[in-house]
Amino acid sequence: MKIIERRTLAWIVNIALPVTTVVVLFMGYKAYTKLNTMVDTLEESAKPNYNLITLNELSFYINEMERNIDAYRVDSRSNHMRSFNTALDESLYLIDSLKETIDDNRVVGLYDSLSSLLGQWAKVQTQIGALNSDILESTLDDLTQKIAQLPETLAEDDTATIPEEKKRFLGRIFGRKKNQQDTTTRPSQSERLQKEILAELSNAKSQSSREGDALKNRLANLSQESAQLQNEIVSLINNLEAIEVEKDQQNVKNVELLAKATNQEIVVFSALTSILLLITIVTQVNYLARNRKYQQALRSAKRNAEELAHAKERFLANMSHEIRTPMNAIAGFTNQLLKSNMSPEQRDQLEVVKNSSDHLIHLLNDILDLSKLQANKVELEKELFDVRATLLEVIRIFEDKASAKGLKLKSEFEGVPKYVNGDPHRLRQMITNLVHNAIKYTDSGSITLSTSIQQKTDKQVTLKISVKDTGVGIPKEKQQKIFEEFEQAQASDQRQGTGLGLAITSMLVNLHGGSIDIDSEVDEGTEMILYLPYEIGEALTPKKDKAKTPQIHLKQLTILIADDEPFNLKLLEAVFKSHEVELTLANDGQSALEALLSQPFDIAILDVKMPGMSGFEVVEQLRKNDGPNQKTPTLALTATISDQERLMSKKIGFDHIMRKPFDEAEFLEAVHQLTAQKTKTRNGIQHSQHMNGQSLYDLSTLKSIGDKDFVTEMVNTFKISAAKSIRNLYKAVDLKIRSSIKEEAHKMLPPARHLSANSLVSSIEKLQRMAEQASFEEINEQIKIVEEIYSQIKKDLESQV
C-alpha cells in the first residue's frame, strides 16, 4: 500500500508541476502585460494636458482682444484693430485645433458654441469701437472756444465793415444768410456776429447732445451685451477646463484601479510561483532520493557487471587454459607424427586432425580477442614492419585453400611505402579475416588483395587496403549487420563460422583510428575496404624471411621443463627428441624451484599456471635467490597471454613468454635465441677480439640464417646505419633534442643485436636511459664510448669479413 501511495503522490507531483508551470507562465504574462499598460498610462498621465494649456492660451487671446478694443476707443488708430483681428483669428484657430483632439460630440458642441460666442462678442466689440460721439463733442467745444475769442480780434476795428465775402463765408458755415440792412442805429458788427454764432452753436450743441444721448444708450446696450457674451465665454471656457480636469482625474482613477488589479495579479503570480517553487523543491528532493537509489543501483549493477566481466575473463582464461592444454598436445603430437613415416591414408587423417585443431585454436583466439576488445584491453604495438611482406604472408597462408577451390589469389600494390610503424600482427589478423571470408563465400573466380595510398604527408600515410572477391555478395540490408557480433549475412552461414571475424576486424579498425567500407551486390561479389593510418618508417635492416629460416639444431643444452600436464611434458620431450639436449622434468612449481636451486641449467621452460606454486612465483624466487640459475634465461608457456600476464612476466623476470599451443619452429627459435651464447661457446665457435671479457660481436647467428652474401650485406648495412646514427646523435646533442637522441639510439639497437655485439648493445641501452634526464655533457661522453666500440667492431669486421 505504501508503495502505491508513493507512486500516486509521485504522479500527482509530476502532473502538478507542469500544470502549475503553465499557470504561472500565464499569470506572469498577464501581470507583465498589465504592468506595462500601467506604466504606459502613468507615462501618459505624467505628460502635461495640452488642452488645458490651449484653453489658457485662448483666454489670453480673448483678453488681448479686449485690451486692443479698449485702446481703440481711446485712440482710433488702425493698428489696434489689426491686433484685435489677429487675436480673434488665433482664438478661432485654437478652438478648431482643440476640436480635432476631442472625440466626445458633447464637448465638440461646446467648442462650437464657444466659437460662435466669440464671434458675436467680437462683433459687439467692433460696434462699440465705431460709436465715437466723443469726437463730435470735442470738435464743437473747440469751435466754441475759437468763436469766443473773436471779439478780441474784431474790437480792433469796430468801424470796419465786414466784407460781403465774409458774410457769405459765415453764412456757408452756419447754413443761413443774414440781412444786413440796418442803416440806422445797430450794435456793432462783432457783437451781432457773436450773438448769431453763439445762437447757432447753441442749436448745434443741443442737437449734438440729443444725438449723444442716443449713442450713449446704444453704447450702454452694446456694453451690456458684450459683458453678457463675455460672461458666457468665460463660463464656457471654465466648463471646458473643468471637463479636462475631470478627464485627468478619471485617468488617475483608472491608473489606481489598474495598479490595484496589477497588484492583485502580482500577488497571485507570487503565490503561484511560491507553490511552483515548493513543488519543484519537492520534486527535486524526490528526484535526488530516487537518484541516490538509482546511483546505488547503478553502482551495484556496475559492481555486478565488473564482477561478471572479471568472472567472464576468468572463465575465458580458465576455459582457454583448459582447451589450449589438450589442444597443445593434439597439435604438438600431430606435428610430430606428420614427421614420421606413415601411409598416405594415415597422413590424410592426421591432416584432418591438424586442420581441425587449427580451426579450434583460431575460434578460441577470436573469442578471446573479442572479449579483450570489448573490455578495451587491447593495445596496439608499434614496430617497424614491411607492409608488402606482411600482406603477402597472408596470401601465402591461403594459397593452398584457394587452390583447392579453384580460386585465383591476386595481389596489387600501388605506391605503397615499404616500411611503416604500427602493429603488423593486428594488420595480419584483419586481412586474414577478410581473405578467409572472401574464400569461404566465393566458389569461382578470384580474390584480389590490393593496397594503395589514400592520403599521404611527410610523416603519415593512410593506406587503402581492399579485399575483393567474385562470390555470392551481400544484400544491402545485411551489409551493416554483418559487422555486429555473432551476425552473418544468411542464417545458413552459421554452419560456416561464428560471425566474429568481421566484428573483430571492425573493432580493430576503430582501434587504429581508421574506417571500413563495404561495396557488394548479390551474385556480383563483395569488396571490403580498410582505411588505416600509419607513420611512415625507414628500415635499418631487412627482416629475415621465416620461410628461409633453416632448421634449428640444439646441442649439449641442459633444459628444465615444468608442467602439471603429463602430456605437455611428453610433447616437449618429443620436440627436443631430435636435439642432443639433457632434459629435467618437473610436474609442479615446487619441484621446479628445488631443481633450479640445486643444479645449473641453460634454460628453464615453465608453465605459468601450476598447482602449489605458479611459474611466476618460481621465477620470482629464482631471481631473488643467489643460486646457480639466478641469471639463467626462462621461457614462460601459458594458455592465454593477457596484457597483465605480459607485464607481470616482464616484471618478475621471465625472458620470453609464449602461448600454447605453440608453433614448433617459433618455439625452437625462441629457445635458440635465449641460449645462443651458451650454445656457441659449447660448440667452440670462435669469437672476435674481446673488450673487458665480452666479445665485440658474433656472426654465427647470421651465418646460420643465410649464405655468405647475406652476412656481407648485413655487415655493410650495420656499418652504414651505425655511422649515420652516430652522426645524428652528435647533431641531436648540439641541438639539445632528447627525443632524437633516444630515437637514434633505438635505431642502432636491432643491427647491433643481429651481430650479437653485446658491449655495443649495453652502451647503446645506457645511452637510451641517459637521454631522458642526464646532462648533455654526460650524453656526449657516452656517445663517444659508443663510437669507440663501433670503430673497433668496424675495424675488426673489415679484416674478418
Image (cartoon, rainbow, N blue to C red):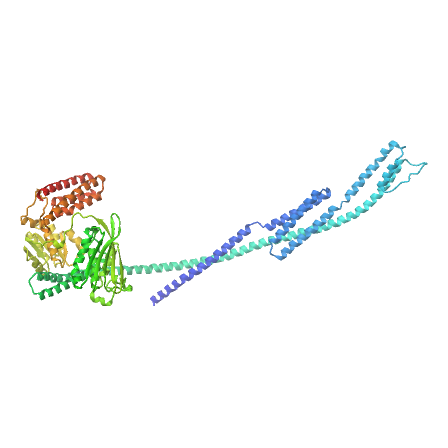
Write down the quadrant of residue 282 in the picture: bottom left
Q: Quadrant of the N terminus?
A: bottom left
Indicate the position of residue 721 as horizontal and vertical percent values: 16, 44
Q: Quadrant of the C terminus?
A: top left
The percent position of residue 458, horizontal first and vertical second, equals: 25, 47
- Say if residue 634 shows up in the picture: yes
The answer to whether one can see residue 375 in this image is no
Residues 236 and 141: in front is 141
Q: Position of residue 612 (x, y in %)?
A: 12, 58
Count up the numbered dots: 0
Q: In this view of the protein, which residue sits in the foreground, 35 or 722?
A: 722
Q: Is 190 placed above or below 709 here?
A: above
Q: Is residue 169 above or below residue 94?
A: above
Residue toward you, 362 or 534: 534
Specify whether 121 is left or right of 794.
right
Name the residue at the top extreme.
156
Using residue 66 as the reference point, say whether residue 337 is left or right of it. Answer: left
Q: Looking at the picture, how far across and down is residue 46, in whole percent?
A: 55, 50
At horizontal 19% and vertical 52% (from top left) the residue drawn is 386
Is 477 rendered above or below residue 206? Answer: below
Task: Give the residue at the far right of this rendering.
Answer: 184
